[in-house]
């Protein structure tokens, strides 16, 4: 079975030194998917600019939500990282946008629904038996 572009980009993003998200639920959602280097913008009372200052790597992904606030954070982060010479990897964000995902915290549920056979392979037999 050929891996989808979405799953492929998720695997690539897991290898990045930093993946920036808005909140704790977003961080937990990505960690459920195997991400290790997730940095939460709103943690321990730090401002967004304090978080930006602490990030010192060559490239990162910004996975803020796709609502008004998330897009606002994305624009600021992208601009500030550009000033610091940090490359923002946007490929996963573009795919998530095309898939109409609005909140990162819902990504695990979306993936389970879209790729049911990959996440629950034992149910494939059940579905094929019922539908036959």
Image: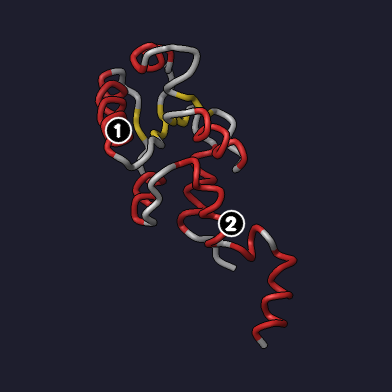
- Residue drawn at the location 26% of the way across and 25% of the way down: 76
Q: So how many labels did they put on this image?
A: 2
Q: Nearer the viewer, residue 91 or 63?
A: 63
Q: Secondary structure at mark 1?
A: helix
Please give the residue where the numbered disc 2 appears in the rendered image: 112
What residue would you read off at disc 1? 69
Q: Earlier in the sequence, mark 2 or mark 1?
A: 1
Q: Left or right of 67: which side holds 21?
A: right
41 relative to 33, above or below: above
Position of residue 95 measured from the top left corner of the image (x, y, whole percent): 38, 52
Q: Residue at x 42, y 29 (%)?
A: 22
Q: Which quadrant holds the N terminus? A: bottom right
Q: Residue at the location (69% across, 82% down)?
A: 130
Residue at screen point 65% across, 84% down = 131
Q: In the figure, residue 49 lies in which quadrant?
A: top left
How far is the residue under mark 2 from the one under mark 1? 26 Å
């Amino acid at each position: 079975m050929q891996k989808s572009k979405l799953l492929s980009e998720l695997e690539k993003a897991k290898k990045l030194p930093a993946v920036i998200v808005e909140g704790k639920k977003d961080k937990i959602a990505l960690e459920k998917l195997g991400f290790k280097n997730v940095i939460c913008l709103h943690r321990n009372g730090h401002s967004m600019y304090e978080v930006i200052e602490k990030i010192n790597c060559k490239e990162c992904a910004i996975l803020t939500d796709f609502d008004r606030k998330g897009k606002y954070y994305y624009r600021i982060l992208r601009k500030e990282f550009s000033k610091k010479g940090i490359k923002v990897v946007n490929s996963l964000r573009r795919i998530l946008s095309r898939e109409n995902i609005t909140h990162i915290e819902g990504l695990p549920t979306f993936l389970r629904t879209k790729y049911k056979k990959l996440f629950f392979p034992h149910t494939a037999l059940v579905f094929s038996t019922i539908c036959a």
